Amino acid sequence: MTKIQVAGLNCQIVDALNGNEPELLAFLCHGFGAPGDDLVPLAQQYLLRHPSLQNKVRFVFPEAPLSLEAVGMPGSRAWWMIDMEALNRAMMTGEFRDLEDSCPEGMEEAREQFINVIDTLLKEYHLSYKNLVLGGFSQGAMLSVDSLLHLPETPAGMCLFSGTLLNKNKWKGLLAKHKGLKVVQSHGRQDPILPFHLADTLKTIMEDSELNVTFIPFEGAHQIPENALRAYVEMLENL
């Protein structure tokens, strides 16, 4: 594992390439309230145990730019701020937050910085967008979709673990330019943070835009199940 700073963001690089050049550059962006290295064990303990990925994929785990120490969450990061009172109220009452028409303040800035990281590393590793796999968990999944829609070319693939639909009209209008993109999407039916039905709506919008979506619903909450990881590995193997 290597820690570097790219375009102002701390990033952790994990691979088993032994000095060889990667075929794919796979980004996994953490969710709101997680530390910057939250998802690193996925590569270390699961993804790179698959021999087919060891000589192929370099994983990048960027750390979100915002610290949550000031709101009582030391060590935690965010891509953009959220309404914590509304989140806590929704979790206590079971009244899901409908975010599909919202464009959160700070998302545009996070997207621009993330795309700068992508472009910098693609250039450094002599790769193109066809070698890029976007992805993330929760807020990191939302960032991945929004970034996809502002790339000049279609990447190799994308994974969305427990994300949701935002900025519906804009996303719906831009997804069609990425026809054929392979997407792995998973969501828990009992997710108390981001409602299942909005993930299902996002899936439908992507399918209507002719993206190639593998959707993995599961009986669980806000998490990444093993069957979603298996689907992610299978997608990487076949890119």
Image: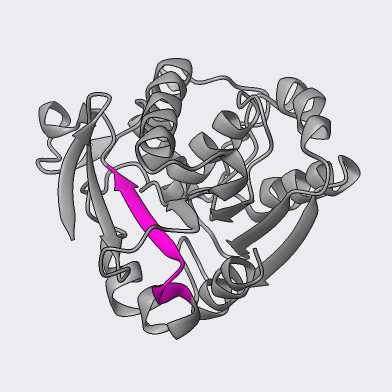
Give the quadrant of residue 70: top left
Colour approach in the figure? one colour
Give the quadrant of residue 75: top left
Per the rendered image, the range of residues in magenta is 53-62
149 and 104: which is toward the camera: 149
Which residue is at 27% across, 43% downward? Answer: 33
48 and 85: which is toward the camera: 48
Give the quadrant of residue 38: bottom left
In the displayed structure, would residue 203 be above or below residue 68? below
Task: Tell me the quadrant of the picture where the C terminus can be found.
Answer: bottom right
Which residue is at 77% across, 37% downward? Answer: 178
Does the stretch in magenta take in 85? no
In the displayed structure, would residue 75 be above or below residue 118? below
Q: Position of residue 101 (x, y in %)?
A: 67, 23
218 and 153: which is toward the camera: 153
Q: Position of residue 221 (x, y in %)?
A: 50, 65
In the image, taking residue 179 as reference, residue 234 lies left or right, namely left
Which residue is at 62% across, 30% downward? Answer: 166
Q: Position of residue 20 (x, y in %)?
A: 34, 63
Task: Tell me the quadrant of the picture where the N terminus can be found.
Answer: bottom left
The number of discs equals: 0
In the image, taking residue 234 as reference, residue 168 lies left or right, namely right
In the image, taking residue 176 as reference, residue 171 lies left or right, namely left
Does the stretch in magenta take in 57? yes
Q: Position of residue 29 (x, y in %)?
A: 39, 46
Which residue is at 16% across, 30% downward? Answer: 71
In the image, taking residue 237 as reference, residue 70 lies left or right, namely left
Does the magenta stretch mainly form a helix, a strand or a loop? Answer: strand
